[in-house]
Image (cartoon, rainbow, N blue to C red):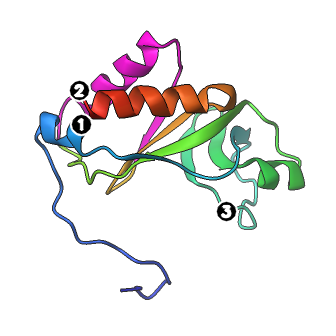
Amino acid sequence: MPNSIGYSQTMSKPISDLKLMISSMEPVLNDGAYVYTSVPHGTDTSNIDSIASIREVEGMTLVVSEKQALENGLPVLYRCSWITLNVHSDLNACGLTAAFSKALAEEGISCNVVAGAYHDHIFVPVALESKALLALKLLQNS
């Protein structure tokens, strides 16, 4: 059911058991290419639909679609693909990030992780997206 700002929110119960989280990961590749960029504090970003943002001493780091970055003249610091783990992982749970980052590291794949309230989001190099998906699916089925 859409809420007042127009998106659907699933009300599933968060999973905290590590084995169940891993077996329920269901990694999905989001369409398109994404980038990490950084803008100075105070920059008007109201016209930018960011995937994630974090305030750092050096500036505001944004994860945005590559298209938006190019349209807005933003510097590309890291070009990546976005994989969402569709398991509703508990924010207090331990071990999921360690498990999937280890599986990716064993394949030589770097990853940058953003935890949302419901899902974990993994940003991997575009050229390695298929290899990353395979590694995550192998982990899920192990």
Q: Disc number at residue 142?
A: 2
Q: Label 3: which residue?
A: 49
**Amino acid under disc 2:** Ser
Secondary structure of residue under mark 2? loop
Secondary structure of residue under mark 3? loop
- Looking at the rendering, which quadrant does residue 136 occupy? top left
Q: Which residues are magenta?
A: 93-115
Secondary structure of residue under mark 1? helix
Quarter of the picture containing the C terminus is top left
Q: Nearer the viewer, mark 3 or mark 2?
A: 2
**Residue at 63% over, 41% down:** 61
Q: Nearer the viewer, residue 32 or 134?
A: 134
Q: Label 1: which residue?
A: 22
Residue 34 appears at what percent x and percent y? 68, 44
102 to 9, vertically: above or below: above
Quarter of the picture containing the N terminus is bottom left
Q: Are marks 2 and 1 in contact (CB under 8 Å)?
A: yes
